């Protein structure tokens, strides 16, 4: 039986902020609507999370026509004092973001 088809309630290992950041790392021009669908959040929640990440320096964006293109400064340290030392890049490496981003750009052929 596929555990992903039957989500568990209660606590999770990742925060919504980490999920949104990983989705953006995989595709820097992803739409808020697509992030919401991927992370099982509302668009409004994703907008709030993006605002949080930008205000604390974990994310920035530029406009390219009607699209936002996000940038993640990967040398930024994690926020919580207990997590001092590792960087955002180290966190994203847990998601294998580089390989996932390449696969997504190749149309999922990897």
Image: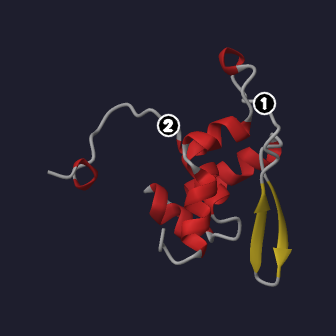
User: Does 50 sit left or right of 65 as displayed?
Assistant: left
Label 2 sits on residue = 14
Residue placed furthest toward the top: 82
Q: Residue at x 47, y 61 (%)?
A: 38
Left or right, residue 31 beside residue 15? right
Please, is residue 29 above or below residue 97 in the view?
A: below
Give the residue furthest to the front. 110
Is the residue under label 2 in contact with that under label 1 (CB below 8 Å)? Answer: no
- Residue 52's quadrant in the figure? top right
Q: Residues within 10 Å of mark 1 (few under 14, many from 20)?
A: some
Residue 83 location (% of width, % of height): 67, 21
- Residue in the picture at 55% in, 63% down: 35
- Residue 90: x and y in percent read 68, 36
Sooner in the amino-acid sequence: mark 1 or mark 2: 2
The single residue placed furthest to the bottom in the displayed view is: 65
Q: CA distance from mark 1 to mark 2?
A: 17 Å
Residue 3 visible in the snapshot:
yes
The residue that disc 1 covers is 77
In the picture, the disc for residue 2 is none
Position of 28 relative to 25 (above/below):
below
């Amino acid at each position: 039986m596929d555990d992903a088809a039957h989500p568990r309630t209660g606590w999770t290992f990742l925060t919504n902020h980490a999920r949104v950041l990983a989705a953006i790392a995989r595709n820097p021009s992803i739409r808020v609507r697509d992030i919401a669908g991927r992370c099982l959040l509302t668009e409004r929640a994703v907008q709030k999370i993006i605002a949080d990440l930008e205000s604390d320096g974990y994310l920035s964006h530029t406009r390219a026509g009607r699209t936002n293109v996000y940038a993640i400064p990967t040398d930024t340290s994690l926020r919580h004092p207990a997590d001092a030392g590792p960087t955002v890049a180290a966190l994203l490496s847990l998601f294998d973001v580089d390989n996932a981003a390449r696969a997504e750009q190749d149309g999922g052929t990897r």
